Image (cartoon, rainbow, N blue to C red):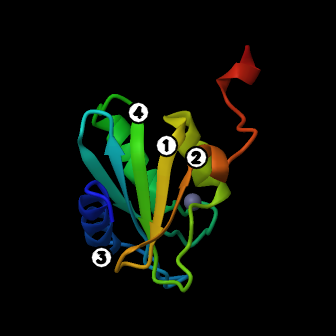
């Protein structure tokens, strides 16, 4: 693991313990390293309606946006109890893209180590972004 991955993994695991997942029973944690050096984290929060459920990655991102960490993601990590561990879903990839560069690193982990790392552009090629809204 790189020097930035260890605190990201620690933060994601701590957040994972707070997950509210009575329906899926899958406890997920995520952490974001922001351009100002701060790390925010989040857990999945499910809802009986299912549609109102939110992923750990988005909780971590929204926390960072609301805390004003320059709105620039340097790296993001998600930890899941699955084998193989889960990468961010498509909705989360889109949300990541709003606040990241194409080369931003996305890591996913089984809780012991980082199992895979890819860039945003690898995970979400042909990204829909603000350029299309002009
Ligand atoms: Zn997601």
10 Å neighbourhood of mark 2: few (<14), some, or many (≥20)? Answer: many
Instruction: Please tell me whether residue 115 is drawn above or below residue 30 in the rendered image.
Output: below
Tell me the number on the disc at residue 130. Answer: none
- Give the Cα separation between the discs numbered 1 and 4: 10 Å
Q: Are marks 3 and 4 in contact (CB under 8 Å)?
A: no
Q: Residue 113 versus residue 53: which sits nearer the camera?
A: 113
- Label 1 belongs to which residue? 104
Q: Residue 13 versus residue 116: which sits nearer the camera?
A: 116
- Which callout, 4 or 2, points to the residue nearer the camera? 2
Disc 2 beta carbon < 8 A from ligand 1?
no
Side of 37 relative to 78 (left or right): left
- Give the Cα separation between the discs numbered 2 and 1: 6 Å
Q: Residue at x 42, y 53 (%)?
A: 76
- Which callout, 3 or 2, points to the residue nearer the camera? 2
Q: Quadrant of the C terminus?
A: top right
- Label 3 belongs to which residue? 17
Question: Which badge, 1 or 4, is on the more N-terminal residue?
Answer: 4
Residue 112, x across and y down, in percent: 34, 80
Question: Which badge, 4 or 2, is on the more N-terminal residue?
Answer: 4
Tell me the number on the disc at residue 120. Answer: 2
Residue 66, x across and y down, in percent: 33, 36
Instruction: Please tell me whether residue 68 is drawn above or below residue 122 in the rendered image.
Output: above
Q: Secondary structure at mark 1?
A: strand
């Amino acid at each position: 693991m790189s020097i930035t991955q260890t605190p990201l993994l620690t933060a994601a695991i701590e957040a994972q313990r707070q997950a509210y997942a009575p329906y899926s029973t899958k406890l997920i944690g995520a952490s974001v390293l922001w351009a100002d050096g701060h790390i925010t984290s989040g857990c999945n929060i499910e809802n009986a309606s299912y549609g109102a459920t939110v992923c750990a990655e988005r909780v971590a991102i929204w926390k960072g946006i609301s805390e004003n960490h320059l709105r620039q993601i340097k790296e993001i990590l998600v930890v899941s109890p699955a084998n193989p561990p889960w990468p961010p879903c498509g909705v989360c990839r889109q949300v990541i893209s709003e606040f990241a560069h194409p080369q931003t690193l996305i890591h996913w982990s089984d809780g012991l180590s980082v199992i895979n790392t890819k860039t945003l552009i690898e995970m979400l090629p042909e990204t829909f972004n603000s350029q299309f809204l002009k």
